[in-house]
């Protein structure tokens, strides 16, 4: 086999491809965060779920698989109890007349929503910049 007189290096255009994949993956994860937060806000007053208990706030946790390096999002229920409100006439009141409301704090959810939106926008900006660099690299 003949020797190659120059070193083979990765093509510059291909080096930009992982940045597209990374930012697209980030946008997907942030989209899932937005869905979780939206569900929390929508259920902030739900005192009875199909299981018969008050809605529990859902929280997303980013996890990386140590074997594959793939990033994923695990959704878990917040274990903290919701607030108890004395309302003996409410259909979901317990024997003492208290109703357990969801453990959702609307203000905290709105802050989380803004953060997730900003991170999503940042990933979209990185994606657009990488795409623009790829277009320019292909025109050379």
Image: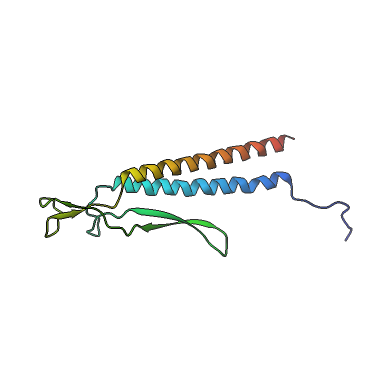
Tally of marks: 0
Q: Which quadrant is the C terminus positioned in? A: top right
Residue name at image x 71 percent, y 38 percent: 137
Q: Position of residue 93 (x, y in %)?
A: 14, 55
Q: Which quadrant is the N terminus positioned in? A: bottom right
Q: Position of residue 37 (x, y in %)?
A: 37, 47
Image quarter for residue 54? bottom left
Residue name at image x 13 percent, y 50 percent: 87
Image quarter for residue 106? top left
Residue name at image x 58 percent, y 48 percent: 21
Q: Is residue 73 above or below residue 66?
A: above
Comparing 95 with 128, the one in front is: 95
Q: Is residue 58 above or below residue 20?
A: below
Q: In this view, which residue lies farthest toward the left?
A: 89
Relative placement, left or right, of 136 versus 98 is right
Q: Position of residue 2 (x, y in %)?
A: 89, 58
Q: Position of residue 136 (x, y in %)?
A: 69, 35
The coloring applied to the image is rainbow
Q: Is residue 44 above or below residue 134?
A: below
Relative placement, left or right, of 57 versus 25 is left
């Amino acid at each position: 086999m003949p020797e190659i007189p120059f070193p083979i290096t990765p093509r510059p255009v291909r080096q930009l491809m992982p940045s597209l994949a990374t930012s697209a993956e980030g946008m997907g994860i942030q989209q899932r965060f937005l869905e979780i937060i939206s569900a929390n806000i929508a259920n902030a007053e739900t005192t009875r779920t199909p299981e018969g208990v008050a809605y529990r706030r859902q929280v997303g946790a980013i996890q990386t698989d140590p074997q594959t390096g793939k990033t994923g999002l695990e959704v878990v229920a917040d274990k903290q109890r919701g607030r108890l409100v004395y309302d003996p006439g409410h259909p979901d009141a317990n024997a003492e007349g208290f109703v357990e409301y969801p453990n959702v704090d609307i203000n905290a959810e709105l802050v989380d929503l803004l953060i997730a939106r900003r991170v999503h926008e940042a990933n979209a900006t990185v994606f657009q910049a990488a795409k623009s660099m790829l277009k320019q690299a292909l025109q050379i």
